[in-house]
Image: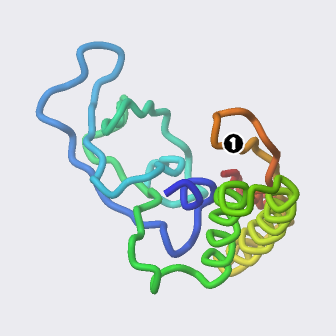
């Protein structure tokens, strides 16, 4: 789930139309919607569900989306994918590299191996996000951005390229 949540992978994107919950939120918003159980991360919500349409303000609280937009909410989200056969090959490589980072010191006892594994992870995730952005058919300039990754002990251990921005399309993970 961690690596899927980092970027809007084409193999993990799904869409649904949500009906409002029977009870409105106690305050602040007009509608509450329950997210599907396989939702890892909600992508920007728009008026018609298309990525380039006007965005809708919303707040996620647990498994609920709260918004003033309704009564139907078109949502694109990253779903939990448990079957490795559904993974993009470059995503699978990046996932393996991330697992190597997490296991390297525990398995080898050497921090130098963790540094090597982290470099492999950064290269794999950069390549995977670039290729995925291109195969989604977005025109524009593909750029990576960096977001902190946290070590096993919760400390900020490194910055890893993990998102792609496509200029002119507003797709920033």
Q: Nearer the viewer, residue 160 or 11?
A: 160
Q: Position of residue 56 (x, y in %)?
A: 49, 39
Asked which secondary structure carries label 1, the reply is: loop
Residue assigned mark 1: 151
**49 sits left or right of 172 in the view:** left
Q: Nearer the viewer, residue 169 or 148?
A: 148
Could you tell me how many numbered marks the image carries? 1
Crowding around mark 1 (Cα neighbors within 10 Å: few <14, some 14 to 19, many 20+) is: few
**113 sits left or right of 47 in the view:** right
Residue at 74% of width from left, 66% of height from top?
125
Q: Against 147, is 49 above or below?
A: below
Q: Nearer the viewer, residue 122 or 136?
A: 122
Residue at 88% of width from left, 57% of height from top?
112
Q: In the rendered image, which quarter is residue 90 located in?
A: bottom right
Q: Position of residue 163 (x, y in %)?
A: 73, 56
Residue at 67% of width from left, 62% of height from top?
107
Q: Nearer the viewer, residue 26 or 2?
A: 2
Name of the residue lying farthest toward the front:
109
Q: Position of residue 41 (x, y in %)?
A: 48, 50
Name of the residue lying farthest toward the left:
22
Q: Against 135, is 3 above or below?
A: above
């Amino acid at each position: 789930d961690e690596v899927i949540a980092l970027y809007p992978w084409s193999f993990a994107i799904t869409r649904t139309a949500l009906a409002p919950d029977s009870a409105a939120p106690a305050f602040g918003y007009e509608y509450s919607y329950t997210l599907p159980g396989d939702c890892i991360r909600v992508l920007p919500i728009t008026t018609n569900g298309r990525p380039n349409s006007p965005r809708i303000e919303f707040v996620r609280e647990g498994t609920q989306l709260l918004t003033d937009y309704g009564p139907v909410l078109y949502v694109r989200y990253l779903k939990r994918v448990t079957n490795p056969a559904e993974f993009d090959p470059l995503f699978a490589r990046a996932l393996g590299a991330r697992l190597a980072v997490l296991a390297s010191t525990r398995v080898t006892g050497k921090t130098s191996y963790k540094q090597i594994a982290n470099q492999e992870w950064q290269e794999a995730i950069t390549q995977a996000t670039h290729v995925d952005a291109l195969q989604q058919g977005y025109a524009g300039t593909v750029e990576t951005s960096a977001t902190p990754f946290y070590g096993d002990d919760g400390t900020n251990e490194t910055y890893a390229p993990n998102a792609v921005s496509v200029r002119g399309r507003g797709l920033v993970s």
